[in-house]
Amino acid sequence: MKIIIFGATEVGCLLATEFFEDHDITIIDKEENQTDEFSKLDISFVTGNACDIGVLNCADIQNADVFIACTAIDEANIVACLSAKRISGIRTICFVSKEEYKKTLYFEKNSINAGDFFIDYIIWPEELLTQDIFRIVTVAKALDVENFADGKARLLEYKVTPNLSIVNKKIKDCGFTHDTLIVGITRNGELFIPNGDTELLAEDKLIFMGTSHSLDILAGTFFHEKEIVKNVSIIGGGTVGLMLAKNLESLKIKTKIVEKNYERCEYLAQELKHTLIIHGDGTNLKLLDEEEIGSADVVISVTNNDEKNLLCSLLAKQLGVNRVIARVAKVLNIPLFEKVGIDVAVSPKNSALAEVKNDLAENNVDILATVEQGQGEVLEIKVKSEFDNKKIMDLRFPTAAIIGIIERGNKVIIPNGLTEIKYNDILIIFTKAEDGELIKEFFKAGSKCV
């Protein structure tokens, strides 16, 4: 696939790094924006502005499959996408930073007068980040949450604390809840696919897949999290903070927002009916203490500054908050946040990258989710007739992978080795991102691989 990316930004670099090994990548931007990171990749670079049709032609837009605009300027992204669509009919993906642009572009795409002149996919990273955080908040102590099969099945990630009964036990001896599977373990920053003989260690991060009901039982039985989230404090009343508060209000979760800008506080007070708005600086320990931020079940720091989010998160930890989630603008800072004890570090750029990967996936092989900063992938694969009635234990995968969920009509099955897959089943498979293509090819090849 030939992909043209307009914008030598951090997002552009993430996209190029993710796709260059399997696809033909061309970057369009000014020469001064090309960083050393791009020079390490086997990609093409066209100097100029993608709003210029001449530059698009230099990038061979007519023979490209996808055009992605991810500069820091919304208007440039929109014009470039519309220009690319007009001259080649290419699939376009446009990054925006303002809600009004997403709403307008989405409306235009679905308008009866749109014709062939529209943008195919509009990505607003802050909205995706909000959705990710909201899923994590609503499941106590989970590091990551993904929903599948219309909510009947889930992926949950938990950290193994030293006091848990499963420490130093083999998976097969833990007696985990029926209808749940450990599909991945992250140890010392590296993700791997476990088996029954894998021993669980303190500080491991365990990735489970299973039915929603069974995972709820698992959480209460093994991770001592029978309580639900009742109150949340948000530091930063920007776009993400506001959207999060609205979502939390819908669940009747008691919510506070600490915001430094007084005018923004007034706006928040108009938009939110059941959220306490506190005018103040989230880095002020005395203020946080006086406002009883330490009593929150979860504290979320979502200002637009990584250093401030890190400091606010550490102060919340000092006040005794058990669970802290921090927004991280620079993806490379995520390991630092986790290393100093922040429970969950999330990036809008990573959320957006996952969406692009999902959009580029083939229709019958979908990437439902990515985990651990892109180290793991959850694939959705429809079973071909060649695999009908094959037992899972007889599938000779070319690499480590686990079928975590089978969707059969309205039924959700958590399989074992003896489970037979059926024609037209939907398989939800967990594997390392680097091995995803091998699993896709396995199911494409059909009878040659079974």
Image: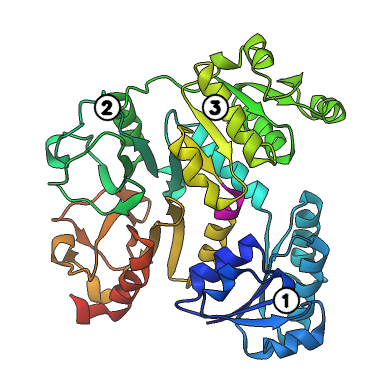
Q: Nearer the viewer, residue 198 or 228?
A: 198
Q: Amino acid at mark 2?
A: Pro
Asked if one can make out residue 246 in the rendered structure from this viewpoint, the answer is yes
Q: Quadrant of the C terminus?
A: bottom left
Query: Left of 298 or right of it: where is 286?
Result: right
Would you name the residue on which mark 1 appears? Answer: 31
Give the structural element (helix, strand or loop) at label 3.
Answer: helix
Q: Nearer the viewer, mark 1 or mark 2?
A: 1
Q: Amino acid at mark 1?
A: Glu
- For the point 73% across and 64% down, the residue is 71
- Residue 39 in the image: x percent, y percent? 57, 75
Q: In terms of secondary structure, what is the magenta stretch mainly?
A: helix
* Quadrant in the rendering for residue 147: top left
- Residue 419 has which mark? none
Query: Disc 1 or 2, which lies upstream in sequence?
Result: 1
- For the point 25% across and 41% down, the residue is 179
- For the point 45% across and 46% down, the residue is 146
Q: Which stretch is magenta?
A: 347-351
- Residue 312 in the image: x percent, y percent? 61, 28
Would you name the residue on which mark 2 appears? Answer: 162
Would you name the residue on which mark 3 appears? Answer: 314
Query: Disc 1 or 3, which lies upstream in sequence?
Result: 1
- Residue 232 in the image: x percent, y percent? 58, 23
- Residue 348 on the magenta span: yes
Q: Amino acid at mark 3?
A: Leu
